Amino acid sequence: MKTMVTVLLLALTAAAAPMGRAQDANADVTDMQALRAAVKADKRAWVAATLALTPAEAKKFWPLYDAYQRDLDQYNRRRILALEGLIARDRPVTDLYAKNLANELIATDEGEVKARRSLSNKLLRALPATKAARYMQLEFKVRSVVDYDIAAGIPLIH
């Protein structure tokens, strides 16, 4: 059980908090292993290298990026708390607990979607549409890797 909590925390931390310099920030974003490594090393540097923003674009983009990352961190923390409770249970899951868990996970997903929609609207006003869409794709890919890592470490409810 402790191993699953550790895997979950590491996966979410890798996506939510940069930890150094990206070794290969220009790695092909279709290579999910390279994506995982680049994001773990330094997500911000990887995004910067991938988007190639002009100074004027960067001035508009980075405050939006930082605010969105804070929102993601908030939802990731809520998700961690909900899933830690599931992992740490040493007795069978009741119907009420399962219902509350499902509702909390859906609420975090809905919050993320709302934050992503707000970010997209702001990005489209701040950047050329192609760069705004490219950044949204990058975030989608990062979220997919994180979701996979979480799913791999979470047991199914019995």
Image: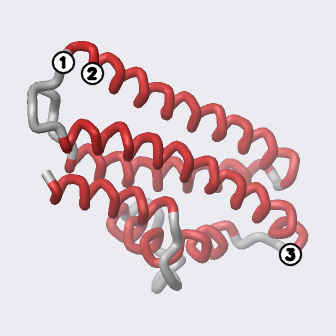
Left or right, residue 102 beside residue 4: right
Give the quadrant of the C terminus: top left
Residue pointed to by mark 1: 94
> Residue at image x 34%, y 58%?
9
Q: Position of residue 107 (x, y in %)?
A: 50, 27
Give the number of the disc on residue 97: 2
Left or right, residue 36 beside residue 4: right
Could you tell me the amino acid type at mark 3? Answer: Pro
Q: Give the vertical position of 113 relative to 31 (above or below).
A: above
Q: Position of residue 141 (x, y in %)?
A: 47, 52
> Residue at image x 66%, y 39%?
115
Q: Give the vertical position of 3 relative to 55 (above or below).
A: above
Cβ atoms at labels 1 and 3 below 8 Å apart: no
Secondary element at image label 3? helix
Q: Residue furthest right?
A: 56
How many C-alpha atoms fall within 10 Å of the one at disc 3: few (<14), some, or many (≥20)? Answer: few
Q: Position of residue 19 (x, y in %)?
A: 48, 77
Residue pointed to by mark 3: 55
> Residue at image x 70%, y 60%?
66
Q: CA distance from mark 1 to mark 2?
A: 5 Å
Cβ atoms at labels 1 and 2 below 8 Å apart: yes
